[in-house]
Image (cartoon, coloured by chain):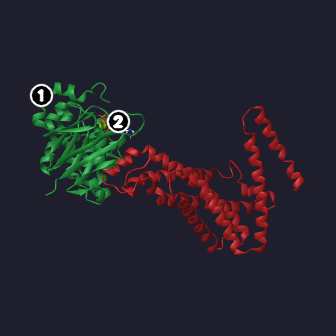
Chain colours: A red, B green
Amino acid sequence: MTLTALSFTLLFVIGTMLVSIWQKLGLEKDIAIGTIRSAVQLLAVGYVLQFIFHTGHIVFILIIIFTMICVASWNAAKRGKGLPGLVWRIALAVTASEIMMMGILLGLHIVKATPQYIIPISGMTIGNAMVVSGLFINQIKQEIRRSKGEIETLLSLGATAQQAMQEVRARAVKFSMIPTIDGMKTVGLVQLPGMMTGMIIAGANPIIAVRYQILIVFSFTASAAITSMLLSVLIYRLFFTADLRLKL
Amino acid sequence: MSALFEIHNLAKHNWDNGDQASKYIFSQLSAEITEPERIALIGASGQGKSTLLRILALLDTPDEGDLLLDGASYKNTNVRLWRMGVSYVAQQAVMLPGSVEDNLRMVSKLHGLAYDSVLAAQLLKQLGLDYLDLGKQAADCSGGEKQRISLIRSLLLRPRILLLDEITASLDINSTQKVEELLMDWHLKEETLLIWVTHDLEQARRISNRTWVMGRGELQDHSSDSFFAEPVAVLAQKFIQPVKGSL
Ligand SMILES: Nc1ncnc2c1ncn2[C@@H]1O[C@H](COP(=O)(O)OP(=O)(O)OP(=O)(O)O)[C@@H](O)[C@H]1O
Ligand SMILES: [Mg+2]
């Protein structure tokens, strides 16, 4: 596909913007910004990846993964305004799940230790961990608001913060994993996942593409579980004052 | 010897600091309790009775002043130990997830203690709940059942001070009487200090030897004998019905 051919797809964008103006949806500006950003970001990433694949140096791989984790954590932390120290806690949870995933995948030689495998797989699992973190934080805040009476009852019986939050945490962890688990159940039936589609379009054998997709689905589930549970351990105390009263 | 429980110049700011007449819900509240007594806390709605009890249980913080348990300030004590000794039974009984039995077992679960099923059964019987299936989901119980379950749940903690917030509000006369009898009995046997919020002055007279009246941000301390020398109806006029323009 040439760049000229690619630029014809801008017709879709222009069409959408015209609809937005016609229907007074007020989305033209956001669509324009989104279009430019996605094009610039993706093209830049393409060149960066080409460079890294060419050199194959571990330092570059680490820098890329580090950047991914930073952006993901910062983004997910936006869900939890007013919770000090949330960003680095999310970063810690995401990093731990990334290390565990890569440890298993590389340690057992499931994928080759080259940037071609490490970077895309990391990107996808970190991205999923980001979504799970955001969901978890949203949900735990709601759960706490809803279960204030329950938590204070436990506190008044002499519970620790950990004991008072146990049920609430479990409910939030469960909730944050629902999309990942539902995705696992319907994958391939409702939609063909992006990576698999990409591989097939680029000429890979569908059987091979599917194998990698299965790998990704399993990694997603594991990393979602690890991230969400770790995060729940790392942040539950943030909702309490030093003298063990519920904030909010 | 230091007093059992002391309240020193306690103050709580109004939640919404708007253009309210007063900055405080109450201020300069002081009281000293030297032995396990039975205190009735009365006052019109919104005077801060629940707020005071919640502060005594450290579920809210005071904005000024101090609380001393056995002479030790709440500021230097372990909050959990304090709450185990000074336990709040809420106005709105909250059932924890699970069965009635899960609720009753919670205290022993939290503190790794053996569950005294004999005592629990006895308390259930005394409060007329022996018909209750312990495996029933606590959330499905009636309001009055929940209130009694939550009282038993706190009694199993055997706190030294029980803060009771209108715990008979949704009970019939019969059950109310059972709760009163049980608590009088418990008070004698366990030497528990009771601070009992009620809107029912007849109940206050029955259960208390001391009466605290909350109103206009102050706390008046009376001996129940002298306080209830006046007819209850007159007292109700004076203290329970909000005086027009007082707030
Ligand atoms: N969490 C809160 N946020 C805002 N205002 C509150 C809060 N808790 C209590 N208040 C206010 O503080 C005042 C005292 O409330 P409190 O519940 O202590 O009254 P009360 O004496 O127990 O009344 P009642 O007899 O109706 O139970 C009320 O004006 C109430 O609206
Ligand atoms: Mg109240």
Residue type at numbered disc 1: Glu
Q: Residue at x 66, y 66 (%)?
A: A65
Q: Nearer the viewer, residue A95 or B8?
A: B8
Q: Is residue B90 visible?
A: no
Chain bearing tag 1 is B
Q: Name the residue: 25% across, 43% down.
A: B29
Graded by Cα atoms within 10 Å as few (under 14), some (14 to 19) or many (20 or more), the crowding at tag 1 reads few
Picture coordinates of residue A59 (x, y %)? 69, 74
Lateral position of residue B178 relative to residue B74, left or right: left
Q: Can you give x and y, in whole percent of width and height, for residue B94 in the image?
A: 34, 42
Position of B94 relative to B235 (above/below): below
Looking at this view, is B224 or B117 the one in front?
A: B224
Q: Earlier in the sequence, mark 2 or mark 1?
A: 2
Q: Is residue A33 above or below residue A92?
A: above
Give the residue at x 29% y 35%.
B47
Number of residues whose C-alpha sits closer than 10 Å to that of mark 2, classed few (under 14), some (14–19) or many (20 or more): some
Quarter-wise, where is residue B50 in the image?
Answer: top left
Residue B117 appears anywhere in the view: yes
Do the dots labelled 2 and 1 sit on one chain? yes
Q: Which mark is residue B22?
A: 2
Left or right of residue A114: residue B78: left
Q: Which mark is residue B230?
A: 1
Q: Residue at x 78, y 50 (%)?
A: A36
The secondary element bearing badge 2 is classed as loop
**Percent of width and height locating residue B108:** 28, 56
Place of residue B194 in the rendered image (x, y in percent of width and height, measured from the top left)? 19, 45
In the shown orientation, is residue B2 left or right of residue A192?
left
Secondary structure type for disc 1: loop
Q: Nearer the viewer, mark 2 or mark 1?
A: 2
Answer left or right for B66 relative to B19.
Answer: left
Which chain does tag 2 point to?
B
